């Protein structure tokens, strides 16, 4: 009887160890998922930096175009379509 209990406990221990090391949610699977998370975090950081650079570039281009338009209107007297330009002398 005692030998049977020891055998059953040993089989239960082996089954638990197999589940721990090879089953769903195992240590190996957890290590693989952590590796994937680390890789995805790096990719997210790279894309965040790229988006920030592109957003900065868009703002610079918008400001640059506004500045260019302002200079053209003031210095060269350029007007937009359907606008009338009035020059007032003091």
Image: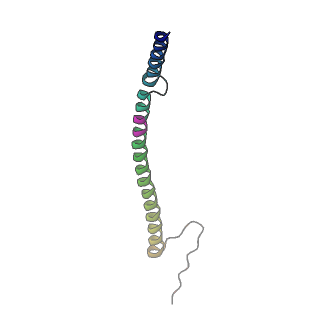
| Horizontal and vertical percent position of residue 75 | 44, 75
Q: Is residue 43 magenta?
A: no
The span picked out in magenta is 34-38
| Horizontal and vertical percent position of residue 73 | 48, 72
| Horizontal and vertical percent position of residue 16 | 47, 21
In this view, the residue farthest toward the front is: 2
| Horizontal and vertical percent position of residue 24 | 49, 25
| Residue at image point 44% right, 17% down | 14
| Residue at image point 45% right, 55% down | 55
In this view, the residue farthest toward the right is: 82
Instruction: Describe the colour scheme in one phrase.
Output: rainbow
Q: Is residue 31 above or below residue 86?
A: above
> Which of the 4 image quarters holds residue 38?
top left
> Which of the 4 image quarters holds residue 71?
bottom left
Q: Main secondary structure of the magenta part?
A: helix
Along the line of sight, the residue nearer the viewer: 50 or 43: 43
Along the line of sight, the residue nearer the viewer: 12 or 30: 12
> Which of the 4 image quarters holds residue 52?
bottom left
Q: Is residue 40 above or below residue 12?
A: below
Q: Is residue 55 above or below residue 74?
A: above
């Amino acid at each position: 009887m005692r030998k049977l209990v020891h055998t059953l406990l040993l089989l239960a221990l082996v089954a638990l160890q197999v589940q721990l090391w090879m089953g769903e949610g195992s240590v190996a699977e957890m290590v693989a998922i952590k590796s994937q998370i680390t890789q995805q975090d790096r990719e997210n950081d790279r894309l965040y930096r790229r988006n920030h650079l592109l957003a900065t570039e868009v703002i610079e281009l918008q400001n640059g175009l506004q500045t260019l338009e302002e200079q053209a209107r003031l210095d060269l007297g350029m007007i937009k379509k359907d606008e009338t330009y009035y020059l007032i002398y003091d």
